[in-house]
Image (tube, rainbow, N blue to C red):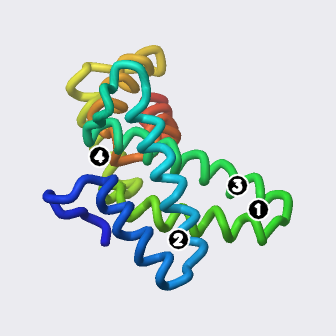
Amino acid sequence: MGIRPTTMSLEQQIMAEMKEAMKAKNEGVLRSLRAIKAEIIKAKTDPGAGGQIDEATEQKFLQKMMKQRKDSLEIFEKQGREDLAIKEKEEMRVIERFLPKQLTSDEVKEAVANIITQTGATSPADLGKVMGAASKQLAGLADGKTISIIVKELLSK
């Protein structure tokens, strides 16, 4: 399911999958799809959106939803709340289907090393310059936290 057909908008795909989840009585998937649909509606009604959203906006809120669930999952696992952790994992699996494939740690390292070379960064003092370029170039392909850790690591060498 990961890559969506170009003829279907995210909203259309979510609606189609919601129907399937309802028929299959799959509450976990349905809950996740409803959360995505709510974000679509919210984004479309934001001032200046004019009832339309582009793919970049979709990717941005899907990334945000994924990060929220990762953060919650971490908290629930620390607290030993496996029941809630399971729900977060279910939702993450559904959201992941609509995001581009995430880069591996090694791929992020390689990209950040190239950015460091391009920007001429030489020390941790250049962190902001490298992070700005890396965040822009790797947007939607890697988690901001991962990018930050790798940038700090490579600039410290």
Residue under label 4: 110
The three-letter amino acid code for the residue at tag 4 is: Glu
Q: Residues within 10 Å of mark 2 (few under 14, many from 20)?
A: many
Element type at mark 2: helix
In-image side of 87 versus 15 (left or right) = right
Q: Residues within 10 Å of mark 4 (few under 14, many from 20)?
A: few
Select label 2 or label 1 by which is in front.
Answer: 2
Mark 4 or mark 3, which has the lower sequence index?
3
In-image side of 69 versus 93 (left or right) = right
The three-letter amino acid code for the residue at tag 2 is: Val
Residue under label 2: 29
Q: Residue at x 35, y 44 (%)?
A: 59
Select label 4 or label 1 by which is in front.
Answer: 1
Mark 2 or mark 1, which has the lower sequence index?
2
Q: Position of residue 143 (x, y in %)?
A: 45, 45
Residue under label 3: 74
Q: Residue at x 48, y 61 (%)?
A: 33
**How many angstroms separate mark 2 from mark 1 (CA)?**
21 Å
**In the image shown, does 68 or 49 lie closer to the viewer?**
49
**In the image shown, does 29 or 118 lie closer to the viewer?**
29
Residue under label 1: 77
Element type at mark 3: helix
**How many angstroms separate mark 2 from mark 4 (CA)?**
35 Å
Question: Mark 2 touching mark 4, by CB under 8 A?
Answer: no
Which quadrant of the view contains residue 123? top left
Mark 4 or mark 1, which has the lower sequence index?
1
Question: Mark 1 touching mark 3, by CB under 8 A?
Answer: yes
